[in-house]
Amino acid sequence: EREKLLEKVRAQSGPWQAALRQLAADFPQHIATVRGWGYLVGVQMTSDPAPWLAALRERGLLAPSAGSNVVRLLPPLNATAEELARAVEIFRAALAAKA
């Protein structure tokens, strides 16, 4: 409460999710949809997420799977806008490497 994390998440999650949705638009062969609430986001892949999770991990982004084809993104509530943007950059690099 003292750090106003909820306000921060509300302010930053919209632009972050929009950037992730842009990835889906740019790479429709790999991403089916992006959905979520606040910082809890699921990126539904068009195939098994395991290779994507490995590619993200190799680039420094840890993400678990959720279900059979979803990459789950859940940054800490104190993540900065720069860190969120970096996560999108890492995801974009992984997608571009396999495009």
Image (cartoon, rainbow, N blue to C red):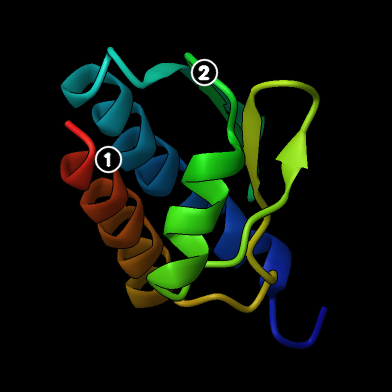
Q: Is residue 52 left or right of residue 68?
A: left
Q: Is residue 94 left or right of residue 69?
A: left
Q: Are marks 1 and 2 in contact (CB under 8 Å)?
A: no
SS under mark 2: loop
| Towards the viewer: 18 or 7 | 18
Residue in the picture at 23% in, 38% down: 98
Report whether residue 54 is seen: yes
Residue 61: percent from the left, percent from the top?
A: 50, 68
Residue in the picture at 35% in, 51% down: 91
Please rate how many residues cluster around mark 1, counting C-alpha atoms within 10 Å: few if below 14, some from 14 to 19, many from 20: many
Q: Locate the N terminus and report the quarter of the image it occupies.
A: bottom right
> What residue did someone put label 2 on?
47
Residue in the picture at 69% in, 71% down: 76
Residue 87: percent from the left, percent from the top?
A: 40, 62
Q: Is residue 37 above or below residue 35?
A: below
Q: Is residue 31 above or below residue 58?
A: above
Q: Is residue 30 left or right of residue 89?
A: right
Q: Which residue type carries mark 1? A: Leu
User: Distance between the Cα atoms at labels 1 and 2?
Assistant: 13 Å
Please rate how many residues cluster around mark 2, counting C-alpha atoms within 10 Å: few if below 14, some from 14 to 19, many from 20: some
SS under mark 1: helix
Q: Which residue type carries mark 2? A: Ser
Q: For residue 95, which numbered disc appears in the image?
A: 1
Residue 23 falls in which quadrant of the image?
top left
Q: How many marks?
A: 2
Q: Locate the C terminus and report the quarter of the image it occupies.
A: top left
Report whether residue 41 is seen: no
Q: For residue 36, which numbered disc appears in the image?
A: none
Residue 79 falls in which quadrant of the image?
bottom right
| Towards the viewer: 56 or 76 | 56
Residue 75: percent from the left, percent from the top?
A: 63, 64
